[in-house]
Image (spheres, coloured by chain):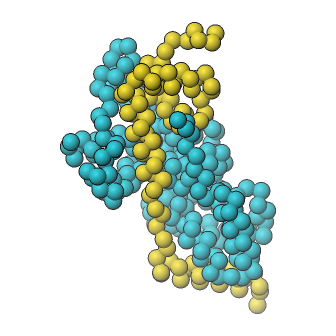
Amino acid sequence: MPTTIIRRRKSSPAAHADEAGLLERLRGGDEAAFVTLVNRHHDAMVRLAATFVASRALAEEVVQDTWIGVLRGIDRFEGRSSLRTWLLSILVNRARTTAVRESRSVAIGDPTGVLDRSRFDETGGWATPPEHWIEDAEERLGAAALAARLREALQGLPARQRAVVMLRDVDGLDADEVCAVLAISAGNMRVLLHRGRAALREALASTMREVGT
Amino acid sequence: MIGTRPPLACIEVVELVSDYLEGTLSRSERRRFERHLAGCPHCTEYLAQMRAVLRLSGRLVPADLTPQMRSEFGELYRRWRAERDGP
């Protein structure tokens, strides 16, 4: 049984070569290359910025600002990191600065244990085991409704968990890339990822309970 | 020390699931984890659900730029190009 989730969607060598090509065209003055690049990363950037600042409008402003910064600094990009890591790191820096300016606290403490202690008995075994729903979840709820529920649950995560889960599981960044972009330790990232994923699982489980068997 | 550690309890397995999926458990931890799974349908179910969450998350499709945003970013780019190339 494979034990690792391997997702290299957007950091494959082919994607890398493709981004290098886009970058070259962009430096050469090709507007379409820029719009393609923006289209590819914009949504993820807005979602990420929104984990730092108070509103969607402000998040979009930060992203717009980031793109201006990217264009002005494009000749300084040497390809030591992937283009995406570079873009997202610039974004996070700006978003943090904006968040401080807007004086909104971004630190959120995590409680202990991802499931309620009452789910387990005194020996640490399941008292209320997880219900069985995965195989027929899509059939019962429909793929679109399931995706909508998942998006909603993502929105409900604490900001730092949301940032990590989105980058790692939705946008498919490597663990190292996530740490680099958010400037957090691997241990810290794993804790946030763990709690975020567990909360998403809980949300889907409760949705499936509502739908009934 | 090898083989002397007590079996994992379900409550501990739940806390290790993400690290297991990330492949960051040590060999011995992973063996302990898998030993528990082999005898525990509930934790096996929990792991399968976690995998389903990851699969579904990976399928969420990012939104494309609207035509208006495309033209705004085009404009942004032209301004930058003009600025760079000078008067």
Residue A53: x %, y % from top left: 50, 56
Q: Is residue A51 left or right of residue A213?
A: right
Nearest the viewer among A200 and A11 is A11
The residue located at (44%, 29%) in the rendering is B14
The residue located at (44%, 18%) in the rendering is B9
The residue located at (41%, 38%) in the rendering is B48
Q: Quadrant of the C terminus of chain A?
A: top left
Residue A6: x %, y % from top left: 58, 46
Asked if residue A3 shows in the view, the reply is yes
Query: Which residue, as the protein is rendered here, is positioned at the far left?
Result: A212
The residue located at (68%, 63%) in the rendering is A14
Dividing the picture into quadrants, the one containing residue A84 is bottom right
- Tell me the yellow chain: B
Nearest the viewer among B47 and A190 is B47
Residue A201: x %, y % from top left: 38, 41
Vertical relation: A82 (above or below) A18: above
Q: Colour of chain A?
A: cyan
Residue A166: x %, y % from top left: 50, 51
Nearest the viewer among B22 and A57 is B22
